[in-house]
Amino acid sequence: MSETQRVGEVIESSTTDFIAQCYELYELPPLGSLVKTGDSDGELYGIVYNATTSGVEPGRRPIARGKDEASETAIYQSNPQLLKLLRSEFEVAVVGHRREGKLCQYLPPKPARIHGFVYQCLPEEVREFSQSFDFLTILIDRQLSVPTGELIAASLRQMGKVRSDDDRGHFLVTAGKELAILLSHDFNQLKAILERIKR
């Protein structure tokens, strides 16, 4: 079994979302990837929907520093303090939880804990979670800072990556059929998502 990769720590939390800060600058999980956080009471699962890198001090933007540098790496070598003055964060839409061993694809009774560790889900966890498509309803019903269609397509592509070629095709066809039902009222959105999950 692969080792679980810790990708950050919860710094803001609500019933529907949480924000996590990365320990290393730019070490962000990909858009649409499945992550988890939790404790002995249970685990929360979410899909990464937005990421930012910004200055630590609110309202103070980073300034350009590379005019006399040969590469981006050289900027950080000449200004090592930048690693302390910048931070990378990602936002997660909560799409399920596990309680008493049962995986549930609906919102949990409590939000994630502040300072809870956030982990990238292992391939076997992603495969288990994506055996059901109930989480798609949560994403479709949400108003997020990124287009819903882009997020759904990204999450299905990420879930497809942990499968063999044959299984991936079957998974994406099954997901497409589920989306056809959920988005029967919005053909343009459905068509756009189906185009994006093929890539």
Image: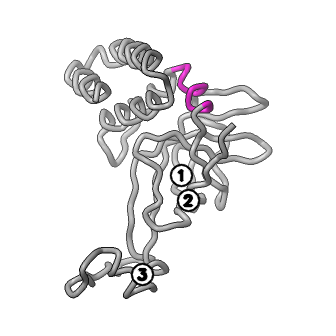
Residue 199, by quadrant, is: top left
Kindly identify the residue that appears in the image at 65 percent across and 55 percent down.
117
Label placed on residue 12: 2
* Mark 3 vs mark 1: in front: 3
Magenta range is 124-132
Give the distance between the C-alpha atoms of the residues marked 2 and 1, in whole angstroms: 6 Å
Mark 2 vs 1: CB contact within 8 A: yes
Residue 114 position in % (x across, y down): 64, 59
Q: Does the magenta segment cover residue 16? A: no
- Closer to the N terminus: mark 3 or mark 1? 1
* Position of residue 30 measured from the top left corner of the image (x, y, whole percent): 42, 47
Q: Secondary structure at mark 2?
A: strand
Mark found first going from the N terminus, 3 or 2: 2
Residue 54 in the figure: left or right of residue 69 = right
On the picture, is 136 further left or further right than 146? right
Please state which of residues 129 and 187 is positioned toward the viewer in this rendering. 129
Quarter holding residue 176: top left
Residue drawn 69% across and 33% down?
98
Quarter of the image containing the N terminus?
top right
* Circle 3 crowding by C-alpha within 10 Å: few under 14, some 14–19, many from 20: some
**Residue tagged by mark 3?**
82
